[in-house]
Amino acid sequence: MRIDGTAYRSIWRDGDGRAVHIFDQTRLPHAFEVITLTSAAAMADAIRTMKTRGAPLIGACGAYGLALALSEDPCDAALARAHATLNATRPTAINLRWALDRLADAVRGLVPGERAAAALQVADAICDEDVAINRAIGEHGLTLIRAAAARRGGGRVNVLTHCNAGWLATVDWGTATAPIYMAHDAGIDVHVWVDETRPRNQGAALTAWELGRHGVPHTLVADNSGGHLMQHGLVDLCLVGTDRVTRDGDVCNKIGTYLKALAAADNGVPFHVCLPSPTIDWRVADGLREIPIEQRAGREVTHVAGLLADGRRAEVRISPEGTEARNDAFDVTPARLVTGLVTERGICRAERAALRAMFPDLAAAHGD
């Protein structure tokens, strides 16, 4: 995507593969800073501390992190250690383990001297494939926005989204934002309600920032206002991303997604999930029972960071001293509340038979 006229991906490497560059997403929207990473440990820290985040992007980051490890030491033990370290950083999003396993499987049969170069090739391929996947998701999702515009007689289409499923969460385009960018670029009058997405405020900090840089009309709203907007006919469709989808169509996404899906169902608002195929976990059927939900520090709930009037960044407490906070990072939306899954191969229902029909090769590869 473009920022002030310059094209970027969310991750890129030096020519020799010994350094990888990402944006520090904890500094956005107030500062646009690039971090250079030269080791698997540094990459693991960036993922853990959410300097980089988003299921597809941390998959790509994990792959490059493993490649960095192999450039230092290509032996089996080093490969296993780096894989375990990176995999432990974020337990919920399936893309990370998928990318790590794919790269490890590709190099394991090679002699050590060949591993580093092969790892870079796999990591590069994962990034290029992610861009193509998200572009295709955008093209299929665009049909939903066109249909909504037709229902409105060409009037403004209001899309509600949650968290950041934009190009900052992927290598490029984004998942839930890809259809929005394509609609805007096609001249459709599209407007986005941006959920703030407490407690880390990825909607307020990231989605609003990238939509603004692309010129897409948007309005920031409090997380609790989505149902109210739907009741008053101000939402035409919901588009969200996902960190893991089960083979039966349950969707795990940023905490608060489930409440939006409930409100959408009650108000007859279409609720679509933009789903790259690497995010499908074919081993899991019941999302509520089988998907591990990341528990993050309570400080993210009790404190909020922002910019002071004098331009300094600060973190302030918003709860009484000594108050304990629980911080579940994700929730699970049952398949019955999902209108459809927007994938790179088309749109399907959130159910096992439809997913198998859309991805027969992947289902068969996982014995489903």
Image (tube, grey):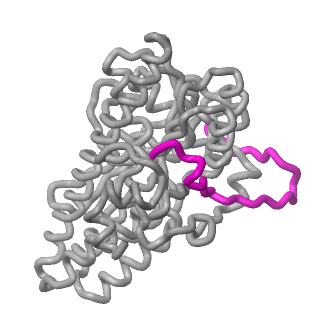
Residue at image location 24% in from the left, 52% down from the top: 129
Which residue is painted at 65% across and 65% down in the image? 295
Q: Is residue 191 left or right of residue 67?
A: right
Q: Does residue 34 appear anywhere in the picture?
A: no
The quarter of the rendered structure image containing the C terminus is bottom left
Residue 167 quadrant: top left
337 falls in the magenta region: yes
Q: Relative to residue 118, is residue 163 depicted above or below?
A: above
Corner quadrant of residue 270 = top right
x, y percent for residue 363 = 33, 67
Seen at 67% across and 43% down, the residue is: 262
Magenta-drawn segment: 312-340
Q: x and y percent of residue 35 in the render?
A: 38, 51
Indicate the position of residue 95 as horizontal and vertical percent values: 40, 62
State the residue in front, 196 or 81: 196
> Camera-side residue: 186 or 308?
186
